Image (tube, coloured by chain):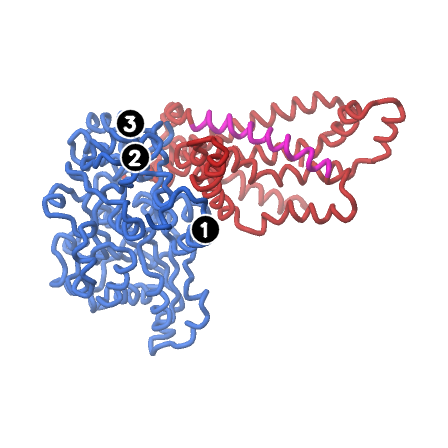
Chain colours: A blue, B red
Amino acid sequence: MSRKNDDTAPISAKKFMDELWRYKQGSVSRRHFLSVTGLGMATAAMAGAMPMLAVSRSAYAGSIGDRVSMATWPNYFNPANFETFKKDFGAEVQVSVFGSNEEMLAKLQAGGTGWDVFVPTNYTISTYVELDLIQPLDLSRLPNFAEKYYTKRFIEPGTVDGKVYAVPKNWGTTGFVLNRKKVTSNPTTWKEFWDLSKTSATGRVMVHDYQLTTIGNALKYFGYSFNSVDPKELADAEKLLLDVKPHLFAINSDYQPSMRSGDAWMSVAWTGDGLQLNRDIPEIDYVLGKEGGELWSDFYAIPKGAPHLDAAYAFINFLIDPEINAKEVSVHGYPVPDTRTTELLPKEMTQNPIMYPAKELLDALEFGAAVTLTDPLRAEIMARFKAA
Amino acid sequence: MLLLPTTLWFLLLLVMPLVVIAVYSLGERAPAGGYQPALTLAQYANLLARLKAFTNTLTLAPLGTVICIVIAYPFAYYLAVKAGRGAKPFLLTLVIIPFWTSFLIRTYAWIYILGGQGIPRLLEMIGIEDYRLIYTPTAVLIGIVYGYLPLMVLPIYVSLEKLDKSLLEVSSDLGANPVRTFFQVTLPLSAPGLVTGSLLVFILLMGEYLIPALLGGGKVYFVGNALVDLFLQSRNWPFGSAVAITLVGIMLAAITLYLTLVGRDRGRQDVSVL
């Protein structure tokens, strides 16, 4: 096979530099890396690092301030677009990446984040409204947003009580990646995923450090809803997780490095990571469990008290511009609910089954439910699973 | 009057936060997470749910400290007593150089060194197959020793540096062999550095979060990790506060015990701690 996935070779200097570059892009995890370590505000100051870009500025320069701060997810943006934004608008983009919606919510609840834009997932928005942490959007300041181009079900969670609080960024699924060279049995269900973890793939499987997907997909083992908060069903899921725990390679939402190095053979995964891994290492495949699992959509939103409000609107409007948005997608591989953008994507993407799974697989999926975000039992089960 | 600024700092930066945490630990988790006032010991009653985190911390922190001593002492001894005038500054610089790079980056590098393409791959070349290092307690221990070694070396070095070399000659002249000289002269005189280094490393290790998070893969779980999860994932501030208060209590007890033992051992000689 190609040199890239020869997992018998020691890591090369080039590969190490690649990994370091990934780290700079914010693709290295979520909570384990940047967020909780004091580098939470790790700045993807791409533009700042490239002086030649700081020259030309458009008429907008200065009017929106010199920076915009965004909280988002890893492997989920195109740094080249941020350079363009800095060039055209004069504001430098600062990025913090997160590992779970819980963590994003925790930071906003604690206050003083300094974020101008954040990227909540569908099921969390109503809670942000309830806790008064998010502001309604003035759509007149987002001329690039036009409802008619968007898929309805991916827009809806952004509107609470008739007010629009968030505009769609991407949608995707939560399935699992597997290395077909190492796992030869062709699992197609969550039941097989968990059973393999305990048997032939022992010590080689990763799950997210994220209660929604880890508990949700454990619930699917028993055929329960991904969103269940029923104590009896959660007790079953906890038992399965505790059984599996000694067999796991790691509990970590940053599974790309381990999948790439061959240390891990399977991992719970999101669409874009599946696509990125498959693009580089063809034997790594992305599978949706037949029983179902999560369908999600992410949004751009503005937190209450955003320090650079003008920059926030300019930045969101810039990112949902179809041309810019298509450049985002070409890098991260998450589909967009905006038909104008999808039309600009190359065929390899629009016909890719990882990005656009078969209808019968999609039909089995569920949107995350708001209750899972605040349910104390789910939070405690995840914490007990990790502490076990 | 002169003590006023110190007292203020002390109250503002140490006592106040502790009081806040103590008050929180008696409260309840608000429905959407966070804190709501209450007066209950329920959080403390639930502490056993994090027993593994406490036992992990209380095993690996002392173990890491002891390994650091075993490696740091001979090194510091060489540096202070044996190294020549030219070599000493060079070696000292080598000890300090790692601090020029973020600890985070250096620990992240260990993920690759300990991962499948690193040391285990080298072991395969000499016939040891399928040896797993990354995301094990051993990996965490290696990270701990790597990260904290300089903090142990430097205080021991300083106390050995001050050691009057003629004392060693006297001991030898009076008939003590090198081993006896070491245990009766060198070691007791370097004890302040040893105590300082041990406390420094142990206290920091008890609160360690980063190394188990990165090299333990969420499987080797310290109290620090439990705290981060409680505050950032579960958003259960009262339970997190109870865990934090308990950790502070355990640390105070451990340190008091340690200092008492060291103090008794050294009779009436003063031990300067920091």
Say whether mark 1 and mark 2 are on the same chain: yes
**Chain of the residue displaying label 3:** A
Using a 10 Å C-alpha cutoff, classify the residue at mark 1 as few (fewer than 14 neighbours), some (14 to 19) or many (20 or more). Answer: few
Using a 10 Å C-alpha cutoff, classify the residue at mark 2 as few (fewer than 14 neighbours), some (14 to 19) or many (20 or more). Answer: many
Kind of element beneath mark 2:
helix
Say whether mark 1 and mark 3 are on the same chain: yes
Q: Which residue is mark 3?
A: A199
Q: Which residue is mark 2?
A: A379
The span picked out in magenta is B53-78
Give the residue at x 27% y 43%.
A269
In the image, residue A99 sits, relative to residue B137, either above or below, namely below
Sequence-first disc among 3 and 2: 3
Q: Position of residue A292 (x, y in %)?
A: 16, 39
In the foreground, A266 or B213: A266
Camera sees residue A369: no
Q: Position of residue A136 (x, y in %)?
A: 23, 58
Kind of element beneath mark 3:
loop
Kind of element beneath mark 1:
helix
In the image, residue A328 sits, relative to residue A4, either above or below, namely below
Q: Which residue is mark 1?
A: A16
At label 3, the amino acid type is Thr
In the foreground, A201 or A373: A201
Sequence-first disc among 3 and 1: 1
At label 2, the amino acid type is Ala
**Chain of the residue displaying label 1:** A
Q: Quadrant of residue A251?
A: top left
At label 1, the amino acid type is Phe
Q: Position of residue B219 (x, y in %)?
A: 40, 32
